[in-house]
Image (cartoon, rainbow, N blue to C red):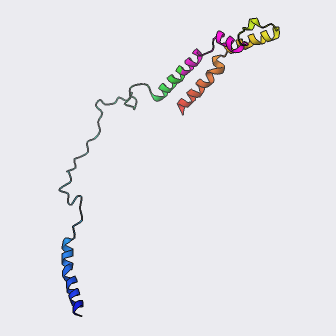
């Protein structure tokens, strides 16, 4: 019984000690004194006032659509410049090591020359224009 009383006294005595050792919670901003004083908001002002005729952008160059259209036109011009030459078509169409003129069979010679003609006439309308139109359509999306 004495042990029980001693144990109860010991527990009661240690409670205030435990309460004193407990640390206070950290408060980031304990009062308004630590926070910087707020100033009145400054309204945004253009360095030079915008005129009604000015565009709503700060970028003075061409618009994104204008740049896209210029790029499409450049690609179309490059496509037209890359059109195959007659000599490259002859090499691609004629039998290896020969020219169309050297083919003995008249029907095969005519076929060879027609293929060379078709190769050189790969016009912009057939090859480049569909690409250009697709490119221009992508500029408006």
Residue 78 is covered by the magenta coloring: yes
In the figure, residue 42 lies in which quadrant? top left
Count of numbered labels shown in the rendering:
0
* The magenta segment: 75-95
- Left or right placement of residue 89 versus residue 12 in this view: right
Image quarter hosting the N terminus: bottom left
- Left or right placement of residue 65 versus residue 98 in this view: left
- Left or right placement of residue 60 versus residue 118 in this view: left
**Main secondary structure along the magenta-highlighted residues:** helix
In the figure, residue 100 lies in which quadrant? top right
Q: Which residue in the rendered view is the most extreme toward the bottom?
A: 1
Look at 19% across and 71% down and name the residue there.
21
Look at 63% across and 11% down and name the residue there.
85
Q: Is residue 85 above or below residue 32?
A: above
Q: Position of residue 5 (x, y in %)?
A: 22, 90
In the figure, residue 51 lies in which quadrant? top left
Q: Position of residue 127 (x, y in %)?
A: 64, 21
Q: Position of residue 28 (x, y in %)?
A: 24, 58
Q: Is residue 40 above or below residue 135?
A: below
């Amino acid at each position: 019984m004495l042990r029980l009383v001693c144990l109860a006294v010991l527990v009661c005595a240690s409670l205030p000690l435990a309460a004193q050792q407990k640390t206070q919670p950290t408060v980031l901003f304990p009062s308004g004194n630590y926070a910087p004083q707020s100033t009145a908001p400054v309204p945004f002002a253009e360095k030079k006032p915008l005129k009604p005729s000015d565009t709503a952008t700060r970028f003075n160059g061409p618009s994104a659509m204008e740049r896209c259209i210029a790029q499409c036109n450049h690609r179309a011009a490059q496509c037209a410049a890359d059109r195959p030459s007659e000599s490259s078509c002859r090499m691609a169409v004629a039998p290896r090591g020969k020219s169309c003129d050297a083919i003995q069979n008249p029907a095969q010679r005519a076929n060879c020359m027609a293929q060379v003609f078709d190769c050189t006439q790969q016009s912009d309308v057939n090859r480049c224009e569909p690409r250009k139109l697709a490119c221009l359509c992508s500029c408006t999306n």
